[in-house]
Structure formats: C-alpha cells, structure tokens
Image (spheres, helix red, strand yellow):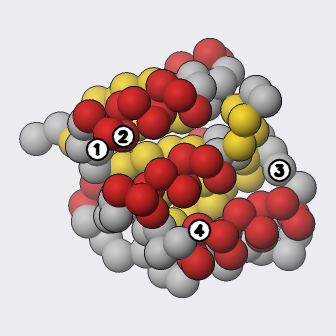
Amino acid sequence: MSKELLAIDDADLHLSILRKIAEQSGFTTTGAESVSVAKHLLRTRKFDCITLDLSLGEQSGIEVLALLYELRCPTPVIIISASEDAALNETVRIGKFLNVNLYAAIPKPVNLALLRQTLAQVFEGAPSEELAIPSSW
C-alpha cells in the first residue's frame, strides 16, 4: 500500500530527488513549489508525511508550520534545509512550541541514505526520537 508524501521545496532538482527517494521508500509524492500551493494542498488533502524546505523564495517554511498548527495536523514533518544552525534551531523551537509533529531535520546537501532511512521509518510508523539539531550544522 502506497502512502502520500507532500514535498515542499521551490527547487525542481530537489523535488525530483525527493520524489525518487520517496518512491523507493513506498511513497507517492505531490510537490509544492511555494507556500501558497502547499497551504492549498494541506487544506484540501491528507498526507502521510511532509518534507519542508525552510527557504521558499520570498517566503518561509515557518508559514507552513503555522498552518499545520492551525489545522491541528498530526502528519510527521521532515525539515530539509540549507539554513544555518541558528535559523534551523529556531525553526525547531517554533515547531515544537506549535506542537507540530517534527519527525526529523536533515541538512542540505541532503544525505540521501539518511533521507531514505528516515522516510522508511515514517512509512513503517516508527515513532520519532526527540528531535535535536546536531551542533555540527
């Protein structure tokens, strides 16, 4: 049985990579290249997992986290970002404060093996461990 992943990223190359890795992990993928498209999809459809880039053109992935809070959406969220440590740490704090189900944070460039492993864990329904941002980011 396939599960549905929403990949939110404004870079076509990254969406293509996410689709391929997600497919290998059992997901079908819907891409959203902007905050407005992501918001529309989240209001109208249910997803089993969300990958979220924090830098979406002129907008921020934090806007998506705020909508997930508003919708009381329990879907696991994997942050995939090239943001600096401080920004990523702050985003994790905001997500936790909003009670968003932050499953993992993966820095760009993406470690594909780690992404594949993380998606497989989500697919299997494995609980996330307490999310902490490594100090090496």
Position above or below: 97 against 73: below
Q: Which mark is residue 47?
A: 1
Q: Which mark is residue 83?
A: 3
Say what amino acid the circle numbered 3 marks: Ser
Look at discs 4 and 3 and give the one toward the viewer. 4
Residue 27 % position (x, y): 29, 37
Say what amino acid the circle numbered 1 marks: Phe
Q: First in sequence: mark 2 or mark 1?
A: 2
Quadrant where the image shows the C terminus: bottom right
| Residue drawn where x is 85% and y is 75% of the image | 135
Position above or below: 37 against 97: above
In the rendered image, which residue does mark 4 sit on?
Answer: 95
| Residue drawn where x is 35% and y is 56% of the image | 71
Q: First in sequence: mark 3 or mark 2?
A: 2
Figure disc tally: 4
Look at discs 3 and 2 and give the one toward the viewer. 2
Few, some or many residues within 10 Å of mark 3 (<14, 14–19, 20+): some
Quadrant where the image shows the N terminus: top left
Few, some or many residues within 10 Å of mark 2 (<14, 14–19, 20+): some
Report if the CB atoms under discs 2 and 1 are less than 8 Å apart. yes
